[in-house]
Image (cartoon, rainbow, N blue to C red):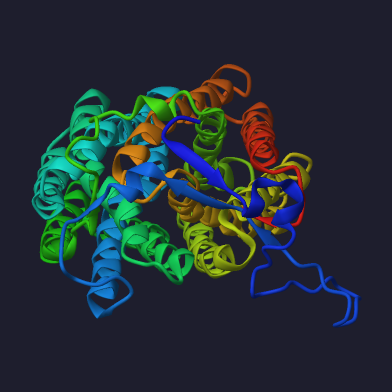
């Protein structure tokens, strides 16, 4: 494909098997003499070959880990707040706006993510041409203003503008920077470093869910939003000086690399991400109210399901980060997507018990954490490091479409088919989304190599 070349030893399929990774995987039940060795498919992006270094700080050093910490905090507050929206959804649906439909209320969180995604397209290009430290700081200020302004809102429409649109715009800057920068700072342990940085969103979702629920119960929703806005603004501002890129594209590079759109692998990747992101927010948004309406649990118990999912997503991010450097990031993305589909189809679709819902939270939380953690690593591995911010920016187009295909149709099914009490149709729809993502990922994987035991 134009702009990218796939390099294999001696350019033959057979030679891939000779390019053995130093770390061999042992098949269960086999002796040490019978090992399944994974060959490695290497990719070289021409944009990387022409890239310019934006700093004299070395990769893999102490400063690189400071960058990882800054990305961790930025994602903890930007995405963590978005992941905790299920608590607000539950509060709006059951207490503050009981007369509004679930579909209308869900648009607050959906607009938040949609603007974050479409704003991410612009943010990705800006990150390649302007100082990401300044952009991150600007995003922090907008995030704070959005939530403080939202605390004075009294209608769903007003909250869509503040908590939804304005916050999404501000969060798009730390979102793009936090997901694209980590891979640039490491040549070794790239998957682990990225996994640690992206685990910030899971950690944020975990404690923000509990904190938001506690703040709403003790101080009320307006003050809960004010505290959240002030804390997020100060924390993200504090780490912005370390939010810097290490590589920038050659000045002759185009702002939008349209050769990516001509690459079949990238098109399959984007299609897979549409359905993966569509599946992402469903359980986080619907489990809290499901726990109250179907399982007759308290609102705080329902919010604990989001906390549990976020906690397991942190484990998934770290585990996949470590394994990605061994088995290949795309292979792990395929495996985690299959696990997410398995969790929803096997444990949530046929059952409506407390035990199975906890199991879904554990399995889906782990799987979805691994998925979002390894996406930037796959993009960097297959399509190049230097243009990763703009690559992620283009991927955010698929995130935007996924946001439209996710929670709004689920909520519409809950209102129109389930009459706000029967979640069956909504859960079925939710479960089929990772299945669709898996099909596109498999097509991408076998487009790159038809061999099963290849590190991709």
Residue at x 33% of width, y 74% of height: 60
Residue 303 location in percent, x, y?
46, 54
Residue at x 21% of width, y 39% of height: 167
One can see residue 187 in this view:
yes
Residue 425 or residue 142, whichever sits in front: 142
Q: Is residue 245 left or right of residue 350?
A: left
One can see residue 151 in this view:
no
Residue 96 location in percent, x, y?
31, 36
262, above or below 344, in the image: above
Residue 14 or residue 410, whichever sits in front: 14
Residue 56 location in percent, x, y?
16, 68
Residue 305 location in percent, x, y?
53, 56
Residue at x 37% of width, y 59% of height: 183
Q: How many marks?
A: 0
Q: Quadrant of residue 206?
A: bottom left
Residue extending farthest to the front is: 10
16, above or below 101, in the image: below
Residue extending farthest to the top is: 416
Q: Quadrant of residue 332?
A: bottom right
Residue 287 or residue 421, whichever sits in front: 287
Q: Is residue 75 left or right of residue 11?
A: left
Q: Is residue 34 left or right of residue 447?
A: right
Residue at x 67% of width, y 26% of height: 425
């Amino acid at each position: 494909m134009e702009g990218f070349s796939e390099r294999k030893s001696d350019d033959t399929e057979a030679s891939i098997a000779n390019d053995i990774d130093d770390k061999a995987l042992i098949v269960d039940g086999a002796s040490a003499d019978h090992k399944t060795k994974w060959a490695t498919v290497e990719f070289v992006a021409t944009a990387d070959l022409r890239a310019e270094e934006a700093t004299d700080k070395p990769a893999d050093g102490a400063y690189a880990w400071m960058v990882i910490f800054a990305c961790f905090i930025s994602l903890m507050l930007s995405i963590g707040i978005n992941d905790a929206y299920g608590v607000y959804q539950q509060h709006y649906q059951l207490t503050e706006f009981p007369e509004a439909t679930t579909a209308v209320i869900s648009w607050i969180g959906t607009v938040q993510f949609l603007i974050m995604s479409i704003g991410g397209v612009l943010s990705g290009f800006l990150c390649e041409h302007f100082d990401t430290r300044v952009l991150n700081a600007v995003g922090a200020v907008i995030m704070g203003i959005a939530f403080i302004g939202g605390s004075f809102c009294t209608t769903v429409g007003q909250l869509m503008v503040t908590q939804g649109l304005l916050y999404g715009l501000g969060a798009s800057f730390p979102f793009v920077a936090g997901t694209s920068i980590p891979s640039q700072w490491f040549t070794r342990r790239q998957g682990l470093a990225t996994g640690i940085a992206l685990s910030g969103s899971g950690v944020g979702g975990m404690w923000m869910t509990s904190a938001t629920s506690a703040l709403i119960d003790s101080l009320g929703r307006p003050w809960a939003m004010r505290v959240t806005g002030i804390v997020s603004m100060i924390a993200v501002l504090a780490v912005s000086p370390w939010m810097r890129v290490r590589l920038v594209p050659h000045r002759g590079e185009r702002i939008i690399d349209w050769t990516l759109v001509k690459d079949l692998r990238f098109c399959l990747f984007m299609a897979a991400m549409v359905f993966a992101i569509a599946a992402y927010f469903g359980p986080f948004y619907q489990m809290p109210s499901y726990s109250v309406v179907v399982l007759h649990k308290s609102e705080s118990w329902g919010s604990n399901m989001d906390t549990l999912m976020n906690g397991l997503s942190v484990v998934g991010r770290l585990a996949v980060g470590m394994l990605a450097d061994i088995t290949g990031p795309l292979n792990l993305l395929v495996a985690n997507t299959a696990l997410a589909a398995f969790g929803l189809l096997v444990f949530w679709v046929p059952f409506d018990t407390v035990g199975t819902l906890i199991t879904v939270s554990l399995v889906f939380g782990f799987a979805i954490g691994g998925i979002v953690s390894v996406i930037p690593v796959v993009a960097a591995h297959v399509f190049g490091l230097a243009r990763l911010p703009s690559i992620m920016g283009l991927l955010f187009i698929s995130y935007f479409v996924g946001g439209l295909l996710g929670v709004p149709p689920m909520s519409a099914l809950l209102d129109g088919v389930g009459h706000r009490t029967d979640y069956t149709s909504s859960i079925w729809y939710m479960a089929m989304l990772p299945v669709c993502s898996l099909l596109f990922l498999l097509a991408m994987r076998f487009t790159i190599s038809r061999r099963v035991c290849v590190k991709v």
